[in-house]
Image (cartoon, rainbow, N blue to C red):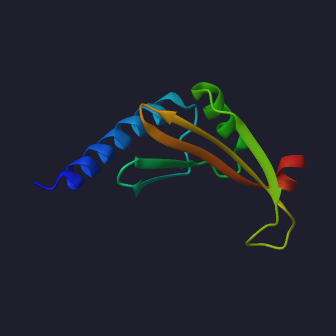
Amino acid sequence: MNTKRIRSYDALMQAFAVTEMVVASLPEVPSSIIMQDTDRQQGCTVRLYFHNAPEQVTDFGNRYGAPTEATTRPNSIRPSGPEAYTEATAVIDGVTVKAWSLTDTVAVTA
């Protein structure tokens, strides 16, 4: 019996369950959801992306006791100016969940 495969399957099922619980608790559905089996020993990581919605990241952080961090960095796609990167990371029932958002700083300051 391949115990690595079983651990990976169990981690994936746990990540699905946590994702369902988290998304159901949020006022807005994320723009995208990515689950990665980043390390077979650590289990899966879930990334929730909120397009131009840093307030949704803050809401996630408040709900799950995760500090929200915001930084500004050069825009990697358009030369329209810098963009704001907001993230909050929580471990929920053993699954690392990161909520994040990219926002044009023009949209943030307008």
Percent position (x, y) of residue 34?
A: 47, 54
Q: Residue furthest right?
A: 109
Q: Is residue 23 left or right of residue 11?
A: right
Percent position (x, y) of residue 12?
A: 32, 47
Instruction: State which quadrant residue 38 falls in.
Output: bottom left
Residue at (62, 26) in percent of width and height: 65
Q: Is residue 13 left or right of residue 53?
A: left
Considering only vertical position in the picture, is 75 above or below 43?
A: below
Q: Is residue 54 left or right of residue 98?
A: right
Percent position (x, y) of residue 6?
A: 20, 49
Q: Which of the two residues, 79 or 85, is positioned nearer the viewer here? A: 85
Can residue 13 be seen at all in this image of the molecule? yes
Percent position (x, y) of residue 40?
A: 35, 54
Can residue 110 be seen at all in this image of the molecule? no
Q: Which of the two residues, 13 or 50, is positioned nearer the viewer here? A: 13
Residue at (46, 49) in percent of width and height: 45
Considering only vertical position in the picture, is 101 above or below 94?
A: below
Instruction: State which quadrant residue 106 falls in.
Output: bottom right
